[in-house]
């Protein structure tokens, strides 16, 4: 194995323990900052920008003015929508450090590969007992592909099972550099039509579809589809995705992930509007009908995952 660069630093916005939905066994998920997509339903909007962002919970604020006094950018003022001028804020975190009530929270901290591995080691017994491991997520972890690769290499050196949650939205060179260190790819495919894909995610899907072929040729892959009403919830939409998934190598399973609004409150904390606030999830009967379509293409279908 290549030498591991334990001193390499990247931006992490969360480390979540005891997950059972993002790969086999009990897992720890490392969430990396940055994403080329801006999906309207994204449950982690704080991940989209590569830089740290400050989240403001007005219900916790006592309006003491401490944050205004410490902000050197002049980004904080009561007249600002959501308190913070996002164009001026540089994500330094001084306001969050000074806030006496925790109304301001910085999302995104610089960590070295060594620091990440030290955190992951706390759960190593769980990995061994459950045949679990670590999962790199985001955002899109391939935005920080060098940092992602070094975490994966260091995890493999520990003997841990590795997985990545990705859209495969990266160059062939990046994918061929990172994926050899991945035991399982959990790969999102959201829509097959480039124009519809761009309307709801901010980018077209040509690079993503090319990337899915590269990834699935290199490692075991599970295709995951967030099922979003008025975007990809029609039977013909799921059929086109399932047919494509069935044509890929190393793909036997497709996960249908029913829409939920669990991340809606985060948009308010970021001073943003949630575009799908009136959207309702599909009924169990509708999801079951989509499951039948997936299975008609010879794939195992799991609801959730």
Image: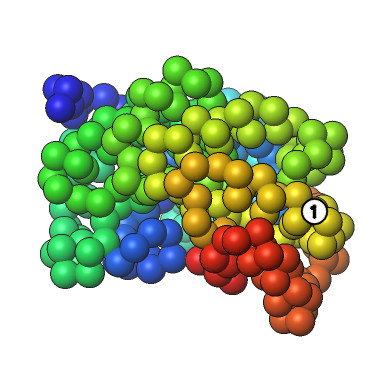
Colouring: rainbow
User: Which one is nearer the viewer's eye here, 9 or 63?
Assistant: 9
Q: Residues within 10 Å of mark 1 (few under 14, many from 20)?
A: some
Q: Find residue 75 and report its horizontal and vertical position in percent.
A: 63, 32
Residue sitting at x 62%, y 33%:
208
User: Which one is nearer the viewer's eye here, 298 or 64?
Assistant: 298
Above/below status of 35 relative to 5? below
Q: Find residue 254 and report its horizontal and vertical position in percent.
A: 57, 59
Q: Which image quarter holds the N terminus? A: top left
SS at badge 1: helix
Above/below status of 242 relative to 158? below
Q: Residue furthest bottom?
A: 285
Q: Quadrant of residue 2?
A: top left
Residue sitting at x 40%, y 47%:
220
37 sits left or right of 194 in the view: left
Q: Residue furthest top?
A: 173
Q: Quadrant of residue 297?
A: bottom right
Q: Is residue 69 at least partly visible in the picture?
A: no
167 sits left or right of 182 in the view: right
263 sits left or right of 227 in the view: left
Name the residue beneath numbered marker 1: 237
Residue sitting at x 60%, y 44%:
247
Above/below status of 288 relative to 228? below
Q: Find residue 134 and report its horizontal and vertical position in percent.
A: 30, 52
Residue sitting at x 42%, y 59%:
22
User: Which one is nearer the viewer's eye here, 225 or 79?
Assistant: 225
Q: Is residue 236 at least partly visible in the picture?
A: yes
User: Which one is nearer the viewer's eye here, 261 or 259?
Assistant: 259
**Number of on-image labels:** 1
Q: Find residue 264 and report its horizontal and vertical position in percent.
A: 68, 61
């Amino acid at each position: 194995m290549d030498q591991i660069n334990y001193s390499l630093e990247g931006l992490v916005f969360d480390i979540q323990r005891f997950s059972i939905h993002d790969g086999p066994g009990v897992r720890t998920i490392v969430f990396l900052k940055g994403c080329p997509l801006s999906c309207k339903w994204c449950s982690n909007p704080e991940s989209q920008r590569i830089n740290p962002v400050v989240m403001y919970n007005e219900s916790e604020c006592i309006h003491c003015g401490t944050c205004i006094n410490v902000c050197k950018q002049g980004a904080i003022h009561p007249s600002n929508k959501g308190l913070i001028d996002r164009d001026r804020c540089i994500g330094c975190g001084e306001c969050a450090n000074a806030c006496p009530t925790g109304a301001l929270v910085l999302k995104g901290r610089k960590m070295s590969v060594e620091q990440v591995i030290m955190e992951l080691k706390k759960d190593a017994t769980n990995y061994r007992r459950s045949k679990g491991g670590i999962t790199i997520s985001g955002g899109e972890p391939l935005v920080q592909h060098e940092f992602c690769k070094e975490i994966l290499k260091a995890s493999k050196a520990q003997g841990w099972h590795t997985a990545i949650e990705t859209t495969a939205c990266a160059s062939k060179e990046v994918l061929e550099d990172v994926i050899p260190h991945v035991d399982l790819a959990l790969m999102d495919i959201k829509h097959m039509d480039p124009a519809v894909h761009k309307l709801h995610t901010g980018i077209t899907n040509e690079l993503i579809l090319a990337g899915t072929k590269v990834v699935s040729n290199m490692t075991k892959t599970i295709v995951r589809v967030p099922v979003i009403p008025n975007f990809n919830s029609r039977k013909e939409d799921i059929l086109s995705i399932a047919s494509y998934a069935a044509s890929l190598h190393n793909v036997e399973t497709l996960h249908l992930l029913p829409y939920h609004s669990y991340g809606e409150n985060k948009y308010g904390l970021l001073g943003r509007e949630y575009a799908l606030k009136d959207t309702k999830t599909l009924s169990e009967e509708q999801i079951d009908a989509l499951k039948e379509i997936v299975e008609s293409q010879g794939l195992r279908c799991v609801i959730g995952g």
